[in-house]
Amino acid sequence: MNKKGIEMAFSWIFAIIAGAVILFSAIYITTKMIGTERKVSDTLVAAELDNLLHPIETNLEDSKYVNIRFVDETRVFNNCSAKGVFGKQQISTASKLIGNDWGEQSVRKTSFNKYIFSRGVEEGKKIHAIVKPFEMPFKIADLTILYGGNYCFVNPPSDIEDEINDLSGDGVQDVGVNISTSLSACPQNAETVCFNMIGCDTNVNTLGSSSNIQGSISKDGETVYYYGGSLLLAAIFSDTEIYECQIKRLMSRAGELGAVYAKKATYLEGSGCSNNLVQDLQSFVVASAINNSHEFVQQVVNLANDLEERNGNIAKCKVF
C-alpha cells in the first residue's frame, strides 16, 4: 500500500472536516449576530412604539386615531399585570425574517401609567390605534386601543357609528373598521362584530346610549362587561385576559384618585365649603377594589354616576 497516498487521503479528510467546522461556525456566528442585531432592532422598535403612544393624550370628550406603520411585518406583544399598586403595562415586538420565520421577541418596554387594550399579539405592517379618555366619574386615564386587520361593525349604535366616521374623516382615512347594516354585506376577510344580534365573531349587547351605554360582549366563548363608549371599543378589540387585567388596573388607579379627592373634599369642608361628598368618595374607594369587569359594573358604576351628579350640583368648591 502507498503510505504517501494514505497520508494525503487523511490530510484531505482532515481538511474537509476542518473546513466544514469552520464554515458551520461562521454560519452559526453570523446567524447569532444577525439574530442579536434583529433583537436589538426590535427592542428599539418597541421603545419607539412606546414613545409614539406616550404623547397621544386626550382632552375630555376627545378621541384620537393614529395609523402606525412598520418597515417589516411586525408582531406587537401586549402583556398586562395587575400586581402592585397600579400594575404594569409591557409591550415588545418581533419582526419577520427571510421566509416565514420570526425574529426573537424584543426586550419588553414597561410602563405603569399606560393602559393598552388589544389582543395578546397583533401582527402586520400596519397597526391602528384609537386613544380615548376614561372617566369614572373623574378622568382616570387615557385608554389606548390597538388592533390590526379589518373589522366590520353590523348595526352599531348611532354614537359608535358617528365616532368611527369622525375618526376616519368620513371615510377619507382607513381606520380598519367598516360599518354595515347586514352581516352578509361585510367584507369576507373582516372580523365581524354584531350589535344586539348574534351570528358574528363578536356579539355586543347594549343598553342605554351615549356616555351611559353599557352591556356585555361575548366572543371566543367568554363574556366581559363594559360601561361607556371607551370600554365598549376596548372590549371589542381586546383579548378577555388583557381586558380584565386592564380593568383591574384602572380601578386601582380610580381608588387611589378617589382617596385623593376624599382628602380634598375633607379639606374643603374644613374650610367652610360644604360638599357632602367625603363619605361617598370613601365608599367609591372601597368599591373600586374589584376582581373582574362584572364586579366593576355591579359595584362601581352607580356610585360613580351619583358622585358625578352630586359634584355637578355643587355651585362652588367642586371637588373634581
Image (cartoon, rainbow, N blue to C red):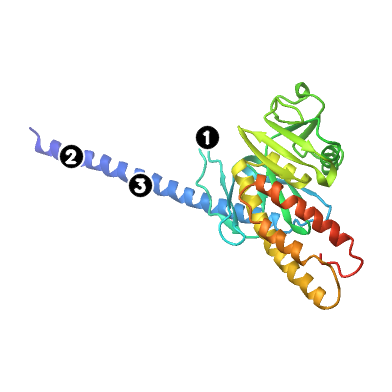
Question: What kind of element bears circle 2?
Answer: helix
What's the residue type where badge 3 is placed?
A: Ser
Question: What kind of element bears circle 3?
Answer: helix
Quadrant, the N terminus: top left
Residue 58: image x %, image y %?
79, 56
Q: Vertically, is 88 above or below 123?
A: below
Question: What kind of element bears circle 1?
Answer: loop
What's the residue type where badge 2 is placed?
A: Phe
- Tell me which numbered mark, 1 or 2, is placed earlier along the sequence: 2
Q: Vertically, is 209 above or below 114?
A: above
Marks 3 and 1, how far apart at CA: 24 Å
- Tell me which numbered mark, 3 or 1, is placed earlier along the sequence: 3
Q: Residue at x 74, y 68 (%)?
A: 262
Residue position for label 1: 100
Question: Residue 177 or 18: which is nearer the viewer?
Answer: 177
Residue position for label 2: 10
How many C-alpha atoms fall within 10 Å of the one at disc 1: few (<14), some, or many (≥20)?
Answer: few
In the image, 15: left or right of 96? left
Q: Residue at x 77, y 58 (%)?
A: 139
Residue 267: quarter of image: bottom right
Inspect this view and state whether residue 44 appears.
yes
How many C-alpha atoms fall within 10 Å of the one at disc 3: few (<14), some, or many (≥20)?
Answer: few
Residue 255: quarter of image: bottom right
What's the residue type where badge 1 is placed?
A: Asn
Question: Residue 43 or 207: which is nearer the viewer?
Answer: 207
Residue position for label 3: 25
